[in-house]
Image (cartoon, rainbow, N blue to C red):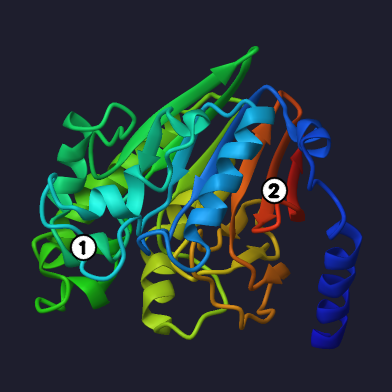
Amino acid sequence: MKRIQVLVIMLAVALTSAFAQTPAEWSKLEKDVNFYVANDLGRNGYYDQKPIAELMGRMAETVGIECVVAAGDVHHFEGIRSTQDPLWMTNYELIYSHPELMLPWYPVCGNHEYRGNTQACLDYSKVSARWEMPGRYYTKVIEDNGTTVRLVLIDTTPLIDKYRNDSIQYPDACKQDLQQQLTCQLAWIDSTLTQAKEDWVIVVGHHPIYADTGKSDAERADMQKRLNPILQKHKNVAMYVCGHIHNFQHIRKAGCDIDYVVNTSGSLSRPKVKAVDGTVFCSGEPGFSLVSADKHTLDLYFINKSGKVAYTVEKKK
């Protein structure tokens, strides 16, 4: 069975490797609502960060994106100390400097933000006109040409015991009480999804619910126990999109309509990735994702660092 999965993955790569590498091809990806997902970025422009940032800008000259969803770890290593930390310039402002990227960025905190001052991540909204983070979890609706997409942006680090129990590396996570998370954030997610009437609903967090990774199994166990039952309860959730693992993965579980999507790193990927239960596609390339939607179709394109579509997660109505 695993050999068949690998062959399917290799065939998907072969079929898509020549697709969408020029502006003429990129224009075919555009629908009513378009936005990027980028995460695991902060390497001061090194490795592939700056070239991928430039690619994002060039593609946005052709595909009219509404925003960038930053799915955590915009800052790596020890996070940031304040709104005036120089890392804001070297990890973010001077890297994503293309004029077409001067639009709203909707971030969530990753585990590396929790190694620093997470309140500064929220407060940076008062410094930067494009950094819009009104809370640790919040919702945004994107609408264009009659198509609506609801983004439910959540704070996953406090939902995982590993981080809240490590006062040395993750002091800000230790300040987040689990019972408060259960009674406040998870209840808010449940309520928000109950009220969501948009054409498409996408939940975005930093940590995966399912993924191939060498990271602790306890991380995904906590996510499966605490978050996943809420997502599966609501039949309007099209995708759960996350980062953290530094490679592309698309997983579908038997009997569940949710597409579980792991977006790769926009700077330094982890190329070793293999199929697990439910894997439809996986790749160790760095890059970002483009999400495009109209009333009838929701597409999430895995864009590699060459500007090619490595794979497409597609949903139809």
Q: Residues within 10 Å of mark 2 (few under 14, many from 20)?
A: many
Q: Which mark is residue 114?
A: 1
- Please name whichever residue, 40 or 170, is drawn nearer the observer in this view of the structure: 40
In the rendered image, the residue lying farthest to the top is 145
Q: Quadrant of residue 117?
A: bottom left
- Examine the rendering and report whether any part of residue 50 can be seen: yes
**Hey, what amino acid is under mark 1?**
Tyr
In this figure, which residue is indicated by the disc labeled 2? 301
Query: What is the CA distance from the residue labelled 2 to the residue labelled 1?
Result: 29 Å
> Can see residue 234?
no
Give the percent coordinates (x, y) of residue 191.
Answer: 36, 35
Q: Residue at x 79, y 42 (%)?
A: 22
Please report the residue visible at 63 percent of the width from the left and 66 percent of the height from the top.
249
* Above/below status of 48 relative to 108: below
Where in the figure is residue 310, as x and y percent of width and height?
75, 58
**Label 1 packing within 10 angstroms: few (<14), some (14-19), many (20+):** many
Does residue 238 lie above or below 272 as drawn?
Answer: above
Q: Secondary structure beneath disc 1?
A: helix
Depth check, front residue: 189 or 22: 22
- Left/right of residue 183 with respect to residue 12 in the rendered view: left
The amino acid beneath tag 2 is Tyr
Total numbered labels:
2
Task: Tell me what residue is drawn at x 22 percent, y 62 percent.
Answer: 79
Which of the numbered marks, if any, corresponds to residue 21?
none
Q: Is residue 104 above or below residue 119?
A: above
SS class of the residue under badge 2? Answer: strand
Residue drawn 52% across the image and 29% down it: 100
Q: Is residue 259 left or right of residue 107?
A: right
Quadrant placement of the C terminus: top right
The mark nearer the N terminus, 2 or 1, is 1
Horizontal side, residue 183 vs residue 71: left or right: left
